[in-house]
Amino acid sequence: MADKSEKKSNDSKPDRIVIVPKNSAEIQKIHVERLMKNIDRPVYIPEINKEKAVPLPPEFVREIMGSSAGAGSGEFHVYRGSRRREYNRLRFIEEQAKKDELDREFQSKVESDRKEAEERTAKKRNKRLRKKQKQLDYKRRNTASTKDGNELKIEEDNNEDTENNQVEEDSFIIGGR
């Protein structure tokens, strides 16, 4: 009986080697090996929030006398801490405003550069099109002057073809006329 229960426990769980990490390098090695066993599984890497949240305005303690005479020794430290937090908050707001201004300037510069590039490409495109049109006009003039008689014949053939096409389109019988 004991042999059967041992077989069942051995069949359900394969032999596992338990490694006790002794330092952080071994812990990292275990994690990497575990990831490499299952390569197809995606790894979740959380994104770091780079932007700080705007700190809230300080909660003013109204009983503070300030750093002047007559204040107790404890109140001065409370006053100094609240003053430091407020200055840090104001500095942060100024830095955010400066960063926003630089971003706006950068975006406007990118936009102006893009418009200038579009204008240059449009100008060059128009120049290419004019050159191409000029070449086509030149070819037409040369073919027209050398083959005046042949060109009239070609135009008459084109007119006859268009008349035949109209007759075929007008008929409703399959197979033509």
Image: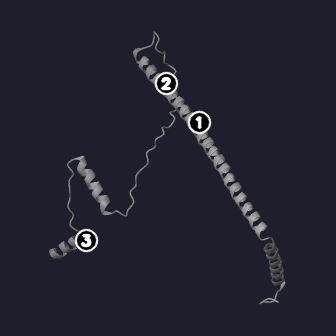
Relative horizontal placement of residue 161, taking residue 14 as reference (left or right)? right
Tell me, yes or no, whether the two marked residues, 1 and 2, touch with CB atoms within 8 Å: no
Query: Residue at point 70% right, 60% down?
Result: 135
Q: Position of residue 107 (x, y in %)?
A: 59, 40
Residue that numbered label 3 is attached to: 12
Secondary-structure class at tag 2: helix
Colour scheme of the picture: one colour
Residue at 48 percent across and 15 percent down: it is 66
Depicted 167 relative to depicted 132: above or below: below
Q: Looking at the picture, how far across and down is residue 106, in whole percent?
A: 57, 38
Q: What amino acid does circle 3 point to?
A: Ser
Instruction: Give the foreground label among 3 and 1.
Output: 1
Foreground tag (1 vs 2):
1
Query: Is residue 26 at least partly visible in the picture?
Result: yes
What residue did someone put label 1 on?
105
Residue type marked 2: Tyr
From the viewer's perspective, is the residue at label 3 or at label 2 nearer?
2
Q: Name the foreground residue: 10 vs 19.
A: 19
Q: Position of residue 11 (x, y in %)?
A: 23, 73
Reading the image, the residue beneath label 2 is 87
